[in-house]
Image: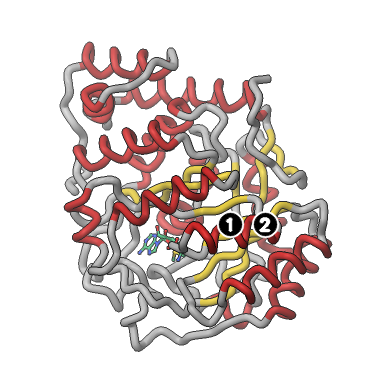
Amino acid sequence: MNMTERSGNEAVFMGAAEKLVSGCHMTRQDFTELLSGYGDLRITEYLAQEAVRVRRQYYGTKVFTRGLIEFTNYCKNNCHYCGIRGGNRNAVRYRLTREEILECCQEGYKLGFRTFVLQGGEDPFYTDEKMADIVREIKSTFPDCALTLSIGEKSYESYRLLREAGADRYLLRHETADEAHYRLLHPEPMSLSVRKQCLYDLKALGYQVGAGMMVGSPGQTWETLAEDLMFLQKLQPQMVGMGPFIPHHDTCFAGERAGSVELTLYLLSIVRLLLPRVLLPATTALGTMDPRGREKGLAVGANVVMPNLSPIKNRKNYDLYDNKICTGDEAAECRMCLERRVASVGYELVTERGDYLWQET
Ligand code: SAM
């Protein structure tokens, strides 16, 4: 997408912004008008200021931290944008053992993490039984911690088994809510309808659910972004993961432009206002595109950071996109670095689980 400024009519996009801020239901036209304000300083500042106000109303100055454990980079899928897609023969593959995963949690617990995120490619090696066993072990060893899974598309039955084993949350970005755009990013047999059904199944099973999309992925347009916002409004997820697309050298999108930091920030403010109590990470991809990207994300409405707890020896191989940051730092260093970054924009990194606020406060 050409991420240049849009030249919408000020009265029109400010009208849409005010509608969003007042909590009204947004139509596709409203979202289109809102996006037409991108690049205008007045609306950008207005949305950011309101997003921060809303974020403070619910979460004060707290920033929640999630210990990310990237436990496998094997993947049976072949998403065109992703460095660990199954078809990439240059990827150096690894899997963590159950014991290694538990060691990561142990170290994270000592550092004050009370949420662990197990993320990986769609790796058939980890059968439902193996995953459920790992989930049960983590939950019984660390009963005061929340456990998030991010292991892709599964059947309702598999999600149920993992929920019963103790998983609390599930991250599954929808990637794009537009059919044609989805097809451009994902080969057969993947489909948007299955992806969406997974998210509805996860919600029905009582998970705290995270959807989201890359910003500036090849083929993305203002219309597909409006569709993403429509979908988020309908789904009402508890978390939204949103970071810039960054090309990976071993994919067919190697020569594409990366997504824009500014547009990601604009969208973070919009999502905070659309879903006021959402748990919204300032992503590693944002930090990769801009050395102060995560701080900027926190300053426009984000309230979560996800430092890496994976063993150093494997970090570089969880290679989703080029130049990914934080691949060489010890978990303790990552945590301290983020603590400083969070404090530099006036917030406080806290150790609590940081669950979704279900009740109005
Ligand atoms: N397999 C799981 C799934 O499909 O949800 C989780 C792992 S997947 C690698 C995690 C996320 O990485 C994806 O949802 C995608 O948005 C993001 N990602 C992959 N390639 C990327 C790229 N080139 N730039 C930015 N983000 C990327």
Mark 1–mark 2 distance (CA, rounded to whole Å): 6 Å
236, 304: nearer the viewer: 236
For the point 62% across and 67% down, the residue is 69
Asked whether mark 1 lies closer than 8 Å to ligand 1, one says no
Q: Secondary structure at mark 1?
A: helix
The image's mark for residue 89 is none
Mark 2, Cα crowd under 10 Å, few <14 / some 14-19 / many 20+, is some
Q: Is mark 2 within 8 Å of ligand 1?
A: no
In the image, taking residue 33 as reference, residue 243 lies left or right, namely right
Residue identified by numbered label 2: 164
Coloring scheme of the render? Answer: secondary structure
Instruction: Give the residue furthest to the front.
Output: 157
Q: Position of residue 88 (x, y in %)?
A: 33, 82
For the residues bearing labels 1 and 2, Cβ distance under 8 angstroms: yes
Q: Which residue is mark 1?
A: 160
Residue type, label 2: Glu
| Number of marks in picture | 2
Q: Position of residue 264 (x, y in %)?
A: 38, 43
Image location of residue 196, percent across then percent down: 37, 49
Q: Is residue 8 left or right of residue 241?
A: left
In this rendering, the answer to whether 86 lies above or below 349 is below
Element marked by disc 2: helix
Evaluate whether residue 228 shows in this view: yes
